[in-house]
Image (tube, helix red, strand yellow):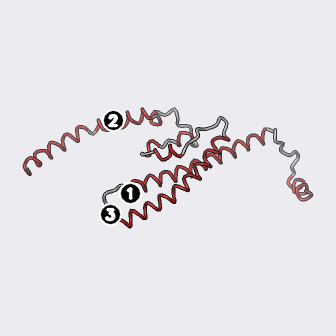
Amino acid sequence: LEVVKDLEIRLGVVRRWEPDGDDWIRVAKMAKNRRYQRAIDALEGLVVARMFELSKVNMSDTEGYKLRKHIAKALQARSKGVRSALERYNEAAAAMTPPRTQLSWEQIVDYAFLADFDLLRDGREDIRGEPWAQPAGRIAMDQHFKLLRVDEEIAHLNLEIPRLVTHM
């Protein structure tokens, strides 16, 4: 305690922060937000890695029993990491004001596409209002860009169909 008092005198600390002071509350909020952001980053990284490993298992060029077995073991190990990251995320989400969305293991397992994994909504910048952040907006954009490529696809098919007919 004497060392702390001596340091405060040397640094010129006039007033200590109190738990109900503005500075204390502001920094506590920043610390909660930081903990939440780190939990999001860790969970997203692990889930994305898991998604890629799952896609590797289902690839047709992943030949060989040993390779598939190796990928399955990696998935099992990653699942433990994802579970612990999920627990840390849920704790950090509950501590936020207002509390953020809690996730369950089933929700994580059900994510089939990166577009479905939308924890980024509560990321550093609030992107919830953006049209591309909404599932309906993503579907509309996918359809829009597919329609933009229709003419190219038709031209390509006009070349391929005669080739196929000639080949038969």
* Residue for badge 1: 57
Of tags 1 and 2, the one toward the viewer is 1
Tell me the kind of residue under disc 3. Answer: Glu
Measured in 3D between alpha carbons, the distance from the residue under mark 1 to the one under mark 3, in whole angstroms, is 9 Å
SS for callout 2 = helix
Nearer the N terminus, badge 2 or badge 3?
A: 3
| Category of crowding for the residue at label 1, using alpha-carbon neighbours closer than 10 angstroms: few (below 14), some (14–19), many (at least 20) | some
* Residue for badge 2: 143
Q: Which mark is residue 63?
A: 3
Q: With respect to residue 168, does 19 lie above or below?
A: above
Q: Is residue 41 left or right of residue 23?
A: left
Give 82 or 4, whichever is nearer the viewer: 82
Give 141 or 69, whichever is nearer the viewer: 69
Residue furthest to the right = 2
Kindly check if marks 1 and 2 are in contact, taking CB atoms under 8 A apart as contact. Answer: no
Residue 141: name its quadrant: top left
